[in-house]
Amino acid sequence: MGRALRAIYPDHQWDLTKISDFRSKNSQKKEIAAVREWVAYAEKGLLIREMEDWYRATPTQVMKVKGSSVVPKLGGLPHILQKVYPDYPWDLSRFVNPSLKMSQPWVMEVLRRLFPRGTGISLSASPTTLHNSMPFSPPLLK
């Protein structure tokens, strides 16, 4: 709208901040910048190295990285990630409800970072396989 007014009335000094179209575009840019900043912060806190890692983030983990004020307001984590990374082919069906098993890949990633040279235990195995291979393993919680 601002461009149209400038084109029609080029001699007038337009204050585009008073035009609602300009304000909404400007506030959208600020919102996207703030969301990008939060996503960068969350990636560090959730140990996100690649896009696929976002699928293992539980809602509880997301809330712990200051997501409680951002995520619900903007329609959830999948919607936020689609805005910040629009070129990535997100599979929305992979974002599921929290469960014990969803946090296990995160624990495995922490172990890989703590013991980069390994521990003699295959950290590429599934959590259930690891549990079953332990000599004195307690029963799994279900």
Image (cartoon, rainbow, N blue to C red):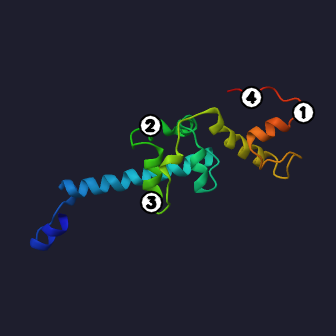
> Residue 89, can we see it?
yes
Q: In the rendered view, would you say 5 is above or below 63?
A: below
Label 3 CA crowd tier, 10 Å (few <14, some 14–19, many 20+): few
Residue 12 point in image, percent of width and height: 11, 68
What whole-number distance in Å separates the C-alpha atoms at marks 2 and 3?
A: 22 Å
Please name the residue that numbered disc 2 is placed on.
69
Of circles 1 and 3, the one toward us is: 1
Looking at the picture, which amino acid does disc 2 mark? Ser
Please name the residue that numbered disc 1 is placed on.
135
What number is the disc on residue 80?
none
Residue at disc 4, secondary structure: loop
Residue 118 point in image, percent of width and height: 85, 49
What number is the disc on residue 140?
4
Label 4 CA crowd tier, 10 Å (few <14, some 14–19, many 20+): few
Q: In the rendered view, would you say 119 is above or below 89?
A: above
Image side of residue 16 versus residue 51, left or right: left
- Which of the two residues, 64 or 78, is positioned nearer the viewer here? 78
What whole-number distance in Å separates the C-alpha atoms at marks 1 and 4?
A: 14 Å
What whole-number distance in Å separates the C-alpha atoms at marks 4 and 2?
A: 34 Å
Q: Earlier in the sequence, mark 2 or mark 3?
A: 2
Q: In the rendered view, would you say 32 is above or below 101?
A: below
Contact (Cβ within 8 Å) of mark 1 with mark 2 = no
